Image (tube, grey):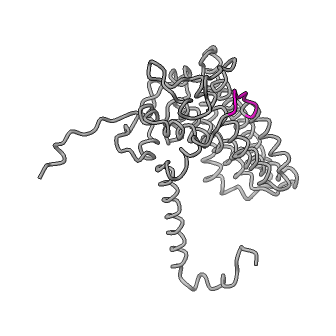
Amino acid sequence: MINQSLLPSSPKIGPSEYWNSSETRKAQRLYVSFCELAASALDYAEGLSLLRRDERRQGAARLNWAGTAFYYSLVHSARFLIFTAVGDFPTQHNKLAQALSISHSGTVSTDWLRSFASNGNVSSATKISFEHLVDYWSSGVSKGPTAAMFNWFADALARAKALRNENNYEALLIAHEYNHSYLGNSFKRLATTMERVAKTALAAVVGCYAHVLQPGPLIQPADASTIGDAMASSENGEPDDGRWRNLEAAFVRHYVENRIVEPARSWYGTEAFVVSNAIVVLMAPLRTLQITGELDLMSLEESVSNDLFAPKTGLMDKFIRKMTELQEALDQAPAVHTANFAGTSTEEG
């Protein structure tokens, strides 16, 4: 019998090698980037809905949760910036801030892709630097403004993280005392400030992405009607950037409309007008991307389907399994504690 430990192990690959290994994975990388962008935008919308409800009804919302939603909008904006540039990101929130800080010496290690990918050969950590991120997002423009924006973002995220911890843990000891003479309007001030920070960060992210997708005059592709053509390799082995960017822009414009703007118009009841208008304004640079030619997104969308995107399907299956386990825990609750619930339901008959 061969001792498996003596066999040579497969070489570890980084995020770039993983995502560029096939046309399908290139499309999947784009989809993951969009998911982080959508999470940032819709978390912002959720926080704004709570904040608006509080303003309209004069105190009818738990503003600590508005602050939490705005904080997670910041987190997903940071993840988007790092993942789109690198193909991976650090899962610890403090490391997101470090990666975007000019004052942080050295590099930051990523760790999300290793747990997400079904490929066991993905490197457990990729080193990323502030300079690397600035280079990516400053393509064709001066690096100074990008570096300054990232450094501001890092500082704001670190401060927001500390407030989130107070807001959702220790501060809950006082969160119910919203009319307290000492606290005054502290939670309203928190939510309002977090909203402005999250909005500033999201606007910067959208602007950066729009510039990367469409930095200048449109490049006329010879034939960009299929994902295969759009991802065709040039002589140096890299994707044809002009044609791929055109397809990427078409995908992003379509998904921003259908997965961000439309939900914001549908989810928030009496707050929908204000919330959706805010989202429309923030997403404008991506909703107005100019596309060359009529592009068929079917092949790209098939690449992120459950049949072809195994890691995403695995995450969904794990989520469903955990929900089932929670239901089983509920079913095993002692009868004496659930007797009063008999005949009650949150569902309408």
Q: Closer to the camera, 276 or 180?
A: 276
Question: Is residue 65 rendered magenta in the image?
Answer: no
The answer to whether residue 92 is above or below residue 14 is below
The answer to whether residue 328 is above or below residue 194 is below
The magenta-colored residue range is 287-294
Q: Position of residue 262 (x, y in %)?
A: 76, 47
- For this orientation, the residue located farthest to the left is 1
Report whether 326 appears left or right of 210.
Answer: left
Q: Position of residue 36 (x, y in %)?
A: 60, 41
Report whether 104 appears left or right of 153.
Answer: left
**Can you see residue 184?**
no
Q: Position of residue 151 (x, y in %)?
A: 60, 25
Report whether 289 appears left or right of 336.
Answer: right
Q: Quadrant of the C terminus?
A: bottom right
**Can you see residue 336?**
yes
Q: Main secondary structure of the magenta part?
A: loop
The answer to whether residue 183 is above or below residue 219 is below
Number of numbered discs on residues: 0
Q: Closer to the camera, 232 or 329?
A: 232
Q: Closer to the camera, 332 or 116?
A: 116
Q: Position of residue 27 (x, y in %)?
A: 54, 38
Residue found 54% across the figure and 78% down from its top? 331
Residue found 56% across the figure and 41% down from its top? 32
Residue found 42% across the figure and 35% down from its top? 21
Question: Is residue 288 rendered magenta in the image?
Answer: yes
